[in-house]
Image (cartoon, rainbow, N blue to C red):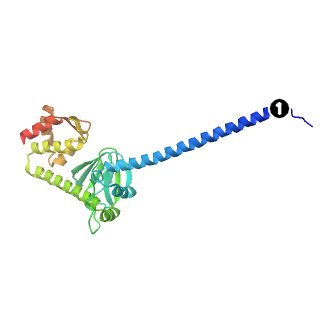
Amino acid sequence: MNYITPRRKKIVYNRWQSIVFQVSILEKVVANVNKINCLKEDHLVVYRELKKEELLRKIVIFKDLSLDSLQVIEKRIQTYEFKKGTRIIAEDEVARGVYFIHTGTVKLTKQDENGNEIIVCMKQKGDAFAEACLFTNKAECYPATATMLEDGKILFLDKLELEKELANYPELALQMVRYMSDGLREMTSQLRDVALLDVYAKTVKMLERLGRKFNTDGRRWDIEIPLTVQEFATVVGTTRESVSRVFSKLRKDELIDLKSRKIVILDWCKLCTVMHKEY
């Protein structure tokens, strides 16, 4: 029979106490780690919600909505990413919903029976398109073809779901009507310029209009419009040759430059001064 000496007992006892102490410390560490992870996860949830809300606040129609109305949109919004040159919708497709641009630029075009294309308008971040399909009693096709001019992120809302929420949330309906009204006003101004002004005046006016749209940072120099000369000519409603002649004069006056399929306004203030002096 083995005999355990008092000294041996004391050593075992001390080791056991040490193990108990270490286990206790480990349990506290684990508890603290779990607590931190929970806090981090809660923080991430809040971060995701804020990020989603901030995303919608960058859309013109949604930026002034109440939180209740915005939460309704959050539940139904779908997000897509498109590469440059991707066709999002075509004018011969049955309209399914409304699109909102979070990032990137979109051109809306129409074609005649011979395949000739004109650019109806340009849309950039914060804008909506295909909203004309709303409030109709029958199935309608999209009013134009939408193509990405730059890589970007597009938000989508189903037409039927959106119309249902517009009936339940009047402020959302009012924002949509205001946006469509502003778009109609801009379109009529553009049609007036195309119909009544000469080529030089139309070109300068359109440069000013597009420059204002794409100058989101309030810069004075090097404002880029992502259009070729041919594409710009279709927006103005004239020939490429006519626009090229005007551009030659504007480049000579150091108002614009052309580079890598873009039109660059070199000096915004100088362009505005020339425009108001002339017109």
Q: Residue furthest top?
A: 7
Q: Where 7 falls versus 119 (above or below)? A: above
Q: Is residue 15 left or right of residue 274?
A: right
Q: Which residue lies furthest to the left in this view?
A: 278
Residue drawn 80% across the image and 33% down it: 10
The residue at which mark 1 appears reads as 8
- For mark 1, give the secondary structure: helix
Residue 227 appears anywhere in the view? no
Q: Which amino acid does label 1 sit on?
A: Arg
Residue 196's x, y, as percent? 8, 50
Residue drawn 83% across the image and 30% down it: 7
Residue 128 appears anywhere in the view? yes
Residue drawn 13% across the image and 44% down it: 205
Residue 47's x, y, as percent? 42, 46
Residue 57's x, y, as percent? 32, 49
Q: Is residue 43 left or right of residue 69?
A: right
**Crowding at label 1, few (<14), some or many (≥20) Cα neighbours within 10 Å?**
few
Residue 19's x, y, as percent? 71, 37
Q: Quick one: 30 or 186, which is closer to the camera?
A: 30
Residue drawn 75% across the image and 37% down it: 16
Q: In which quarter of the image is the C terminus?
A: top left
